[in-house]
Image (spheres, grey):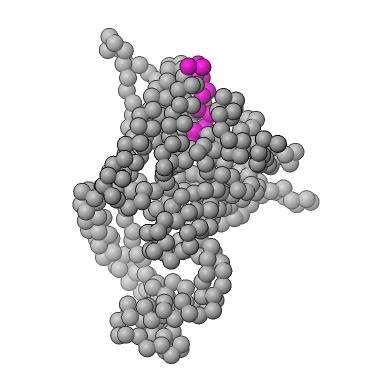
């Protein structure tokens, strides 16, 4: 999937901002506290890299009433799907996908599309066999057999021909796994450790996708899942015994090692062997280390593009590289290096770059249509301003 633009509602100062482009690159400009970092964090929430907190929800002050946090909070993206993704999900080439979190509920991904008007035909695969049989009989269906799979297949075929409505509905797990990969680098306050972890985490995810390793990883995941399923069955039986009003109780464990990479502390020393405490070093040295990490990441992205093409693998997912004020604490020569890194990454086919910056050098170097100016209104809400051309 390839994210082309996104909108945000109810996230910090972003009460409602629409159609923020994801280009090569997109430049977010504006004064401090204008909403640049909020936009980047909202993007991370959309792609599953940020856990929403109550403080993230926009504070709403109603006239004559006490204020409070809004609900729901959502970030919606417009995605381009490749042929393989369309074949698996039967979605069109362009799809609206959002991640939404309502108060007291877990965040979830949804897509906007057609769905049977009869809610009983939604997610029939989760129903018990008896319920499926009753529903098939009500619609006068003739399944190919008496197994649950036969009933599900017959009801799904019927659902495709039943009256439809356009609405938000759960996003298939296959597409959740194809969401763009986010590489988020801080600027002013980022520690070298954080930059190293971001860079190596990209390698970790790439290795998990390696066919030579995937088989072994899946075997372990399957074995752990089977063991958990046995425990879940025991749990369900216990619930049914103590809560007789519930006839159907199911728990379906899901196991994934995708988020297993934790951290990679960076240790450096001088020529005489004296260790350097980076937490006490000047911002300049920390920023130069981070800059070296960014250069290495750029080479890694280029190498990944080449090897994927040589192996003839599935279309790579989009990688979105985010920089938050990347040229802070850097002299002019190193600022030029930052610009060169960004330009190099923007030439890669499956890489997009989003930069929050005050630097006129970066702003002047891109198409004016890719500059998003953010400012706070008198009400404390972020307003998006864009120019379509030089006029």
Residue 390 in view in this figure: yes
Residue pictured at 50% horizontal, 38% vertical = 24
Residue pictured at 53% horizontal, 34% vertical = 355
Residue 256: x and y in percent read: 32, 53
Q: Quadrant of residue 345?
A: top left
Instruction: Determine whether 24 is above or below 76 in the image.
Output: above
Residue 369: x and y in percent read: 61, 39
How many numbered dots are placed on residues in this image? 0
Residue pictured at 42% horizontal, 24% vertical = 291
Instruction: Determine whether 293 is above or below 149 in the image.
Output: above
Q: Is residue 128 left or right of residue 372?
A: left
Quadrant where the C terminus is found in the figure: top right
Instruction: Determine whether 307 is above or below 279 in the image.
Output: below
Residue 167: x and y in percent read: 56, 67
Q: Is residue 214 left or right of residue 352?
A: left
Q: Nearer the viewer, residue 96 or 364?
A: 364
**Which stretch appears magenta?**
322-333
Residue pictured at 48% horizontal, 16% vertical = 333
The reply to whether the magenta stretch includes residue 324 is yes
The reply to whether the magenta stretch includes residue 11 is no
Residue 353: x and y in percent read: 48, 38
Residue 57 in view in this figure: no
Q: Nearer the viewer, residue 230 or 128?
A: 128
């Amino acid at each position: 999937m390839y994210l082309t633009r996104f909108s945000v509602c109810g996230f910090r100062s972003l009460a409602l901002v629409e159609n923020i482009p994801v280009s090569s690159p997109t430049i977010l400009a504006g004064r401090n506290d204008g909403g640049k970092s909020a936009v980047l964090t909202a993007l991370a929430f959309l792609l599953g890299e940020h856990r929403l907190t109550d403080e993230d929800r926009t504070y709403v002050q109603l006239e004559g009433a006490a204020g409070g946090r809004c609900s729901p909070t959502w970030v919606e993206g417009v995605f381009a799907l490749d042929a393989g993704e369309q074949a698996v999900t039967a979605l069109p080439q362009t799809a609206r996908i959002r991640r939404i979190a309502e108060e007291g509920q877990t965040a979830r991904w949804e897509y906007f599309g057609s769905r049977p008007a009869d809610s009983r035909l939604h997610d029939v695969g989760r129903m018990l066999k008896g319920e499926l049989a009753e529903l098939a009989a009500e619609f006068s269906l003739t399944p190919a057999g008496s197994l649950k799979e036969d009933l599900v297949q017959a009801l799904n075929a019927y659902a495709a021909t039943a009256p439809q409505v356009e609405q938000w509905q759960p996003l298939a797990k296959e597409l959740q796994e194809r969401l763009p990969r986010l590489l988020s680098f801080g600027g002013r306050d980022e520690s070298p450790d954080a930059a190293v972890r971001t860079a190596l985490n990209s390698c970790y995810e790439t290795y998990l996708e390696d066919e030579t390793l995937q088989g072994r990883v899946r075997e372990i995941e399957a074995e752990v899942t089977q063991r958990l399923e046995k425990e879940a069955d025991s749990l369900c039986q216990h619930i049914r015994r103590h809560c007789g009003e519930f006839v159907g109780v199911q728990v379906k464990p899901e196991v994934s090692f995708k988020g297993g990479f934790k951290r990679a502390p960076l240790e450096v020393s001088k020529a005489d062997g004296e260790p350097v405490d980076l937490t006490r070093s000047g911002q300049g040295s920390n920023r130069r280390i981070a800059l070296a990490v960014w250069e290495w990441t750029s080479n890694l992205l280029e190498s990944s593009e080449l090897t994927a093409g040589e192996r003839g693998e599935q279309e790579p997912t989009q990688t979105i590289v985010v920089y938050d004020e990347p040229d802070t604490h850097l002299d002019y020569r190193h600022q030029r290096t930052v610009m060169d890194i960004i330009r190099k990454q923007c030439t890669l086919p499956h890489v997009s770059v989003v930069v929050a910056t005050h630097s006129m050098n970066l702003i002047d170097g891109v198409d004016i249509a890719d500059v998003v100016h953010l400012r706070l209104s008198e009400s404390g809400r972020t307003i998006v301003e864009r120019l379509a051309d030089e006029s």
